[in-house]
Image: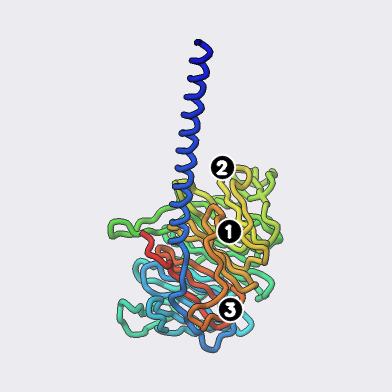
Amino acid sequence: MLAWHRRLARKKEEIQDSILLDDDQSAILVAEEKLAQKKKKLELKQTGLLKIEGSDFISLLQFHPYEDIVVVYDDQDGISVWDSNRGSKEFTICNGNPKQSRFTSSCWIGEQSNSLLVSGCDDGSVRIWGGLPFPRAGGDSSVSLVSAFYAIPNLSPDMNKSGLVLDWQQHSGQLIAAGNSDIIRIWDINSERCSHKLTTDSDACITTLTTPWCSDLQDGGIVMSNSGIGPNLLVAGLSDGSIKVFDKRMGSPVIETGTMAPISGRGRRQRLMQYKEHGSWVVSTVFTQYNGRPEIVSGSVLGDVRIFDLRASSSVQTYTVQRSKMTAMCVHNKIPMIATGSHARFIKIMTLDGDSIQVIRHSQMNQGRRIGPVSCVTFHPHRPLLAVGGRDNFVHLFRPRDPIV
């Protein structure tokens, strides 16, 4: 009798375990279905096609954070400002840079008020344009050159180098300039002088610059944030695949991405953490703070994407996006998604976890033709809006198929 009760109890346990297993499998299936639905909402459709007359390829694209405009830089000295909703050209600026030079960087100054547009070229020159008439303002064109200077003196144009790379810090009024130089220069725009310099301690050129500062709209006002890791960090990607993190208050780099190695110097910290994991030219570096975790997302020409936590000695996540060479990459500020481009004439959209959302090869608004080799991609800072430019005279605008709530 006792053995029979034991067999009965064991049978009940097996049935309960089977029920729990079925419940777990059902929960997993429900979670996977919800995830698939969310990924489906991130799929993009083409909503605009801009034709840039007189241009052979698109150098740069820049959205305005609060106006419905996108700025297009051509392969010469033309800057055109377009209405991103209506697809109409508002006005054009002749930048005046030499014919042998090209645009390599762009940013906004004071975009929440007077909105000055900064253009940087690979001869080291910076031009700041003001008086831009935006569509919502309805004003007449009164574009004027506010300031011009050489952010990096004696910089020679070279198609095989990064040229001039810029990043603007609104909170401090500083313009950070780097590129084909072993010196990072920090400019005080109010006084129009180089306030101090940082050395890269490398023969490789800087290809990307980013800082943790960003602006956001909250309760009708604009709030500045620094990803929770302090206002003085500066991240630079280099052509040799390394990623260096500098502290602006010091005369030498603080952290570098690769292998750990000590470095001598007169700064307060004399040890340089070096993590070199990318094997080639770094295409993009971006600060993110999804789920409250400040991280750096980077991608290289070889098609690999790596995510770094500055508290760790190596990348916390890595995955391969594409086998062909990656020529452009951007990460959305608000939505955990990545867009990459290739000379193989396609755009790939992925989640920040590395899950593929879609691959775009054809233009729905250009008779289904194949898009050109991709030269630049950029997300709108706050909206689910993507702009793509290539080695032709077209700019493609994409939005989600379904509204994102």
Determine which quarter of the picture holds residue 157.
Answer: bottom right
Which residue lies at the image location 46% right of the left edge and 43% below the top edge? 26
Q: SS class of the residue under badge 1? A: strand
Q: Amino acid at mark 3?
A: Arg
**In this rendering, is residue 306 above or below 177?**
above
**Pick the front one: 65 or 104:** 65
Q: Which residue is mark 2?
A: 311
Q: Which residue is mark 1?
A: 197
Q: Position of residue 142 (x, y in %)?
A: 37, 83
Which residue lies at the image location 41% right of the left edge and 53% below the top edge? 225
Which residue lies at the image location 67% right of the left edge and 49% below the top edge? 258
Q: Earlier in the sequence, mark 1 or mark 2?
A: 1
Q: Residue furthest left?
A: 220
Q: Position of residue 370 (x, y in %)?
A: 58, 78
Q: Earlier in the sequence, mark 1 or mark 3?
A: 1
Which residue lies at the image location 49% right of the left edge and 72% below the top edge? 387
Tell me the mark number nearer the camera, choosing from 2 and 3: 3
How packed is label 2: few (under 14 Cα within 10 Å), some, or many (20 or more)?
few
Q: Are marks 1 and 2 in contact (CB under 8 Å)?
A: no
Distance of mark 1 from mark 2, alpha carbons? 25 Å
Q: Which residue is mark 3?
A: 370
